[in-house]
Amino acid sequence: MTARSAGILLYRLMGGGMDVLLVHPGGPFWRRRDRGAWQIPKGEIAAGESAEEAALREVQEELGTAVQGTFVPLGTLRQAGGKIVEGFALEQDLDAAAIISNRFEIEWPPRSGRRQSFPEIDAARWFSISEAEAMMLPSQQPFVDRLADYLALRH
C-alpha cells in the first residue's frame, strides 16, 4: 500500500507578492543538502484521521505552533519516492525563527549501535515564489504553482 501524507503550505501576502513557508528536514541525511531539499510541513496520515487533521497535527509537531484558518485544497501529488501527498494552503504569518520541532531517534552512525536524537525540522524559512522554485523539493513544487494560480483567480 502506498504511503499517504498530508501537509500545509503556509503563505503570507506582502507588498503585492507572496511568500511561502518551507521547512528543512533535520537529521544526518539532509544535513548537507540545501537546494532542492526544502519542503512543506507534512507527515503520514494515521488510521482514522482525515488529511486535514493530519496536516494540522504535522504542522503543530514540526513547527511547534498551532495554525488555524480556512484551508485551500491543493490536491494530491506523487513524490519521487512514490509517496502520495495531499496538500492544503493556509494564509498565516508566523516567526520562522521561533519554530520548535519534535525530535526523532535513529541509529547513527549506521551499524554503530548508538542512537541519536535529531529535530524532525532543523529550520523554517519564508521564501518568495522564485526562491521557493530554486530551493524546494522538486516533487512538491506543484503545490506552490497551484497556490499561485488559486490566488491569481481570486484577485
Image (cartoon, rainbow, N blue to C red):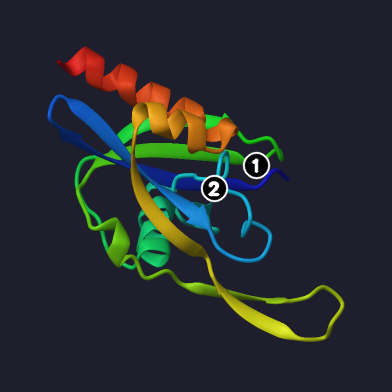
Residue 126 in the figure: left or right of residue 111: left
Q: Is residue 3 above or below residue 98?
A: above
Instruction: Name the residue rendered at 62%, 50% in the picture.
Output: 33
Cβ atoms at labels 2 and 1 below 8 Å apart = yes
Q: Secondary structure at mark 1?
A: loop
For the C terminus, the image quarter is: top left
Seen from the viewer's position, the closer of residues 77 and 111 is: 111
Alpha carbon distance from label 2 to label 1: 7 Å
For the N terminus, the image quarter is: top right
Count of marks, rendered view: 2
Question: In the image, residue 137 lies at what x, y percent?
Answer: 56, 38
Residue 68 in the figure: left or right of residue 31: left
| Label 1 crowd bin: few (<14), some (14–19), many (20+), radius 10 Å | some
Image quarter of residue 143? top left
Question: In the image, residue 104 lies at what x, y percent?
Answer: 58, 74
> Which label's residue is closer to the chain start, 2 or 1?
2
Tell me the kind of residue under disc 1: Lys
Residue 153 in view (yes/no): yes
Q: Which mark is residue 83?
A: 1
Seen from the viewer's position, the closer of residues 28 and 90 is: 28
* Residue named by callout 2: 5
Question: In the image, residue 127 lies at what x, y percent?
Answer: 35, 39
Tell me the kind of residue under disc 2: Ser
Instruction: Name the residue rendered at 25%, 56% in the picture.
Output: 67
| Label 2 crowd bin: few (<14), some (14–19), many (20+), radius 10 Å | many
Residue 100 in the figure: left or right of residue 25: left
Instruction: Name the residue rendered at 59%, 32% in the picture.
Output: 139
Instruction: Name the residue rendered at 28%, 66% in the picture.
Output: 98
Seen from the viewer's position, the closer of residues 4 and 148 is: 148
Seen from the viewer's position, the closer of residues 55 and 142 is: 142
